[in-house]
Amino acid sequence: MHKLLRASLALALAAPFGALADTTPSEIESLRREIKTMRAKYEARLQTLEQRLKAAEAVRAETASTVRAAGGAVPGPTGASASTSAPAASPAPVASSAPPQSSPPPIAANPNAFNPALSLILSGNYTRTSQDPEKYAIAGFPLSGDAEVGPGSRGLSLAETEIGFAASIDPWLRGAAFVAVQPDDSVSVEEAWVQTTALGRGFSLKAGRFFSGIGYLNLRHAHTWDFVDNPLAYQALLGGQYGDDGLQLTWVAPTDLLVELGAEIGRGRGFPGGGDTSRNGAGMRALSAHAGGDVGVSHSWRAGLSMLEAKANGQELVATDTAGATMAHDFSGNTRVWIADAVWKWAPNGNATRTSFTLQGEYLRSTRRGELVYDVGGVDSAGALRAVQSGWYLQGVYQFMPRWRLGLRTERLDSGTPDYGPDSSSLAASLGATGYRPHRNTLMVDFNPSEFSRVRLQFARDRAREGIADNQIFLQYQMSLGAHGAHGY
Amino acid sequence: MKRKTLFVLVAALLALLAPAAQAALRVFACEPEWGALAQELGGDLLEVSVATTALQDPHRIQARPSLIARARNADLVVCTGAELEIGWLPMLLQQSGNAKVQPGQPGNFAAADFVPKLDIPDRPDRSQGDVHAAGNPHIQTDPRNIAQVAVALAARLQQIDPANAGRYAQRATDFAQRWQQAIARWSAQAAPLQGVPVVSQHKAFVYLYDWLGLREVAVLEPKPGVEPTVSHLQSVLASLKATPARMVLYAAYQDPRPSEWLSGHAGIAMVKLPFTLGGTEGAKDLFGLFDDTVARLLAAAGASR
């Protein structure tokens, strides 16, 4: 309506202006062009409306006729004639009988019609910590440089910006890519995979870079987490989140109870794998089994057991001793991580719009076997290593009213007693192993104005470092633009 | 090696546990109305499972494990489409590993593809709330839409299960007759509702209004999918002074409080509509759904006269 008004105003003004001698020809020309484009726009819009009207009329007419004929549109009303004609002719008549009823939108030769669904996640934080995040470490857990550990940088900062693309490739495959732009302007490919859609019988095969299907949280992107950060157990034992380049085969059993089995092989490019990954074979293997179902209409659950095995060859690790000094190690060997996960959700009558509650917990246990080149007093020496480390978290998130959620998480790590071979006890002491158990408690509250936006306040008391309590406050926003993503359980 | 054997054993065990291949066509319906319609058209040829209830918000369903398992085993998925299930159905289909029900396959049926849609936004933008680019998806509130979907769904059933095409056709004819008679009856009963001004809590009933000639004068949600705020309710109340309404309508799955507030302050009737099967006591089947909807509207119109 506004545009029409503007157009008529422009017309009314343009007429007297034309008579004015001092109006430049270019102005008139531009006005003319503007009017022309406006007219074109309105004609196009009128045409679409007309088409829509026609489609609607066609459908109305068709139903009226089918109703009058009482089944005229569907093959033979008598069983005998239908059963003889149906098998031979069934696909064709149906294919032709369905489309005329739908009103195909007039997308005439739009080259963008097949563009992938595009989504964009915008996120930013304000972080306040009582300890210097630069010196963050998890006592007893030597970590590789690429591990995502700690509260991030202090003050106001942009968080990860994630761009996602997803579309069907052809009738048999679909593909997706998620590219993360870090606040330091570096770009990384978080996921980029193709997946079969036509294998059937519950099988899907995925190839490319993807988050492993182990555990519960591992495959979830940061913007779907219930807290600002990942649990300590994920940070210490999986380097944050385990993603790899490889293949994944999943199978959903034909049962009423959900049973999902997964097998993966990969390059082993990130912690607990890593280092030199140049090999012909696989550097990572993973197996996972999950089951899930409903209990009544208000409760649902999912639980599983997964195992990840990764090879490391010359993996550089940074350990921090009790004094806060860092030491560089070099690990070569195998790491096996077992994960037990369980989640239980409640929503009255299955309607989570008003109130809901989620209880979730995971237990991770990692066994590292291999050779460690360690640096004690600036001298490299090599020795065998066998270390069993574990950690767990338990969290509850309660939506107490529409749009508001409250969450509590508690977690603990156990660095175990690493076995360094014959001189184990003296080495352990000089490597800073004290048997300290890092732990953390976290409280968060978030407000979700819509399905597409979230603002979160989180407070954590982090005791990952021995004898030091780090009070962390986060204020975070997460926004989702573009394609409406479907959320996993 | 051992682990592999174990894996194979577990898989074999699960395959044994699986329900023996059934003759019945397995239909996964996203909403109760489509489950009921499939049942009308397929009878005992179908084994219908419904993903949601009338007390759940069909926009916001979690992709629960049980739903993935059911999508895995379905021969046909019958949903509303028009982006109503966009937050959960794609996830179910992706995780199901079921090739038959992927979008574009005959086993994937979206009812909204077969009816002309209302409320198609000129320029979809989320500043307008949870709008659907394809138009308003709540098509089941108009029985004439159900009739159209029935024709298309019967055709689809015949395509997927050609061996029983004759029986589907027969049932479709029978249903169409009974449905047309029922529509005529409801339309006659609802004649007094023509032009009655109403307020809706969510823009959930445009097709119902289109059918019965009810006039929507205000909506309690400031934008589709956005919870009513006190200030917006006040402004609706104020607007009713100039354009009075006779009743405020809400769907069974919605929080009744905003409607209660308006009903109390404006002194107009409040009507809980079943919206789908099971939303109210009376809405036991497709016919009951509209019997009860019309009865409730008439009762409210009569009371406020």
Image: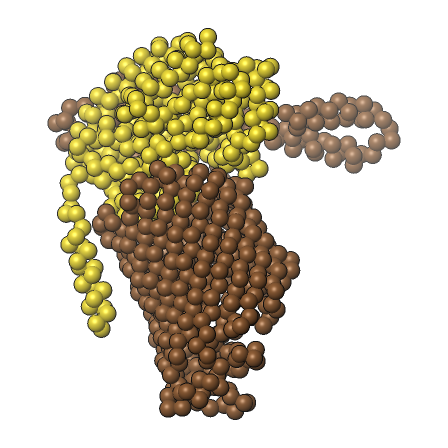
Chain colours: A brown, B yellow
Residue shown at the point (21%, 37%) measured from the top left: B47
- B127 vs A90, left or right, is right
- The reply to whether residue A193 is visible in this rendering is no
Relative side of B140 to A315, left or right: left
Residue at the limit of the structure toward the left, as seen here: A80
Would residue A138 be visible to someone looking at this image? yes
Write the residue at 28% across / 41% down.
Answer: A296
Question: Please, is residue B277 above or below residue A357 in the view?
Answer: above
On screen, residue A260 above or below A451: below
The foreground one among B133 and A162 is A162
- Tell which residue pokes out farthest to the right in this image: A22
Image quadrant occupied by the N terminus of chain A: top right
Residue that appears at 21% across and 66% down = B6
Q: Observer-nearest residue: B130 or A115?
A: B130
Pick the residue in front: B227 or B140: B227
Left or right, A217 with respect to A111, comes to left
Image coordinates of residue A421 in percent, x first then y, are: 37, 88
Q: Position of residue B203 (x, y in %)?
A: 48, 27
Q: Residue at x 41, y 77 (%)?
A: A312
Spot occupied by residue B143 in the image (x, y as percentages of width and height): 35, 21
In this rendering, is residue B196 above or below A255? above
